[in-house]
Amino acid sequence: METHLADFIKGTRAGQEAEAILRACVHCGFCTATCPTYQVLGDELDGPRGRIYLIKSVLEGEEPTAKTQLHLDRCLNCRSCETTCPSGVHYSRLLDIGREVVDAKVPRKGRDRLLRGVLRNALPRAGLFGAALRLGRLVRPLLPRVLQAKVPERTGAGTRPSNTHERKMIELAGCVQPSMYPNINAAAARVLDRLGITLLDAPGVGCCGAVRFHLNDVEAAREDARRLIDAWLPLLEAGAEAIVMTASGCGVHVRDYGHLLQDDPAYASKAARVAAAVRDLSEVIAKEQEPLTALLEGTRKDRQGVATAFHSPCTLQHGQQIRGVVEGLLRAAGFTPRPVSNGHMCCGAAGSYSILEPELAEQLRDLKVESLTAGSPIVIVSANAGCIAHLQAGTPVPVQHWIELIDQSLSV
Ligand code: SF4
Ligand code: SF4
């Protein structure tokens, strides 16, 4: 697509990136068919091709309006369009650039501004978020409906293994996950322990920065990234094999640290080193499939035919292009993952999207729950705490992280 960028962005790093992305787009519209917001709203400007057109106009000098901002806000950044695009258009990067420019020109007001400020400051602080969650559980009936659904019941974490193995990997505990679902990281540590791997926690690292990045506080997100890099690099240098992500939303963001800090001379190469060490938990476990199968062998028949449904988060299947791995692990463990129609579609959780755009998020969740429950699973599993909480609010079928099923199977 031919572009003529305006002076304010022409020649800048962001401008060059945007220009290359825009040139790759041939405006074919294939991506529109797999865009969740286009499917729900039916407006070209709520699909990828329309949003690309809007961003192009703004970068060419057209003044954005609140309507431009609304169409970009409604984008889930699910990246389904990137998976579909035959020309390899890096839409999500263009969206980041477009949102930054539009937000600078169209200041947010009132409730929207306040809500974004609260989310930026509360979600990444694990201690503050944990206290808010405890309070939320106490006053759940008084909360607005959209927040009630975000407050899961309290669950235990079980015991963390105390063995020390020669093989070590690093975990990212995360910011909201330890308070919402403490069993996920503990289950990952127990399964890896059975496979002869110690999961190290770098204390106090906190949020990976994804929350602030997607709320357009890019400088704060860079600070988050630097803090994690400083905590992790010594562990990598001491021989840790990988940085394991139990939440795919964090994984996709940390894999991008090299890009985020590319202009920081003190951190660019460190960031690239850290990003290269990131592995989704499913990739790690899949590499250990042989010993895992041996461990599970004695109890496999107990689970034969137990119907599950796997919701693959967009950050796993589109963002990290990891597909079929979790389903393979579930099958190897004796479960029967049911086929899920429209598996490429986002569930509507999308980080803080379900709070900022609750109506759309609920519509998408209901469509997703319908697909996931069509095969009457007794449990739904996913790979990201945000998706788990969002889906659980829309179905009585229990929703868990897939590693919890593997952990339970090993404990039988
Ligand atoms: S992003 Fe890709 S699929 Fe969508 S219109 Fe452009 S070239 Fe076509
Ligand atoms: S990222 Fe998702 S919601 Fe946004 S345009 Fe692409 S497919 Fe549509």
Image: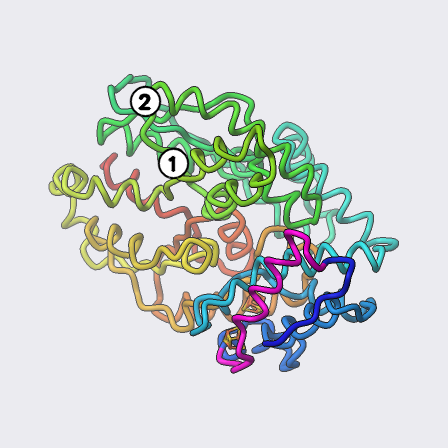
Please name the residue shown 60% across and 62% down the image: 76
Quadrant occupied by the N terminus: bottom right
Q: Quadrant of residue 101?
A: bottom right
Instruction: Examine the rendered structure and indicate whether residue 190 appears above or below residue 361.
Output: above
With 175 as the anchor, is 375 left or right in this view? left
With 96 as the anchor, is 70 left or right in this view? right
Q: Amino acid at mark 2?
A: Gly
Quadrant occupied by the C terminus: top left
Residue wearing tag 1: 277
Q: Determine crowd level at label 2: few under 14, some 14-19, many 20+ residues with C-alpha closer than 10 A.
A: few
Mark 1 vs mark 2, CA separation in Å: 11 Å
Residue wearing tag 2: 239
Where disc 1 sits, the SS reads loop
Q: Is mark 1 within 8 Å of ligand 2?
A: no
Please name the residue shown 38% across and 21% down the image: 237
| Region in magenta | 10-30
Q: Determine crowd level at label 1: few under 14, some 14-19, many 20+ residues with C-alpha closer than 10 A.
A: some
Magenta stretch, main secondary structure class: helix
Residue 221 position within the rendered picture, expressed as x and y whole percent measured from the top left:
64, 39
